[in-house]
Amino acid sequence: MKDLQTFCRALASPVRLEILRLLGSHPLCVNALAGHLGLSAAATSQHLRLLREQGLVQDDKRGLFVHYRRDDEAFRDGLDRLRDFWEESRIEEGLRGDLHEK
């Protein structure tokens, strides 16, 4: 469950959602992302850290800069986990309903 909670937490921030949107077209470095977001590079790095820990972004060192790219496969995997959780909870709710009727 913790994995799913971390995935949902990563998506709970409007800033992190915007980072993922910006990285949808091409890789960007921290400073470019910070400029688009109107945040400091340090604040942007903290958001990227959480996204990277969840595997939603990957980093590539290019000379002196680190460029980040969105990992669409990891995002789909997270959505699959969320869907599985949702379906399991619906099944469990159905079982609880059956028990209450008896």
Image (tube, rainbow, N blue to C red):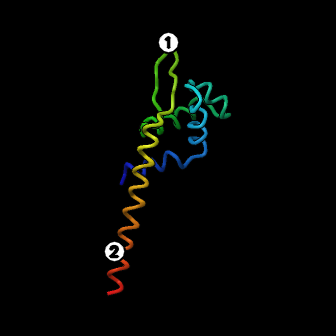
Q: Position of residue 29 (x, y in %)?
A: 56, 24
Report helix, strand or loop for mark 1: loop
Quick one: 3 or 102, which is closer to the camera?
A: 102
Q: Position of residue 23 (x, y in %)?
A: 57, 31
Report helix, strand or loop for mark 2: helix
Q: Is residue 13 above or below residue 32?
A: below
**Three-letter code for the amino acid on which mark 2 is drawn:** Leu
The residue to which callout 1 is attached is: 63
Q: Position of residue 76 (x, y in %)?
A: 45, 43
Q: Which mark is residue 95?
A: 2
- Disc 2: CA contacts within 10 A as few (<14), some (14-19) or many (>=20): few
Q: Quadrant of the C terminus?
A: bottom left
Residue shown at the point (59%, 37%) measured from the top left: 21
Q: Position of residue 58 (x, y in %)?
A: 45, 29
State the separation of the CA atoms marked 1 and 2.
57 Å
Residue shown at the point (40%, 67%) measured from the top left: 90
Quick one: 5 or 45, which is closer to the camera?
A: 5
| Residue farthest to the bottom, as pictured | 102
**Three-letter code for the amino acid on which mark 1 is drawn:** Gly
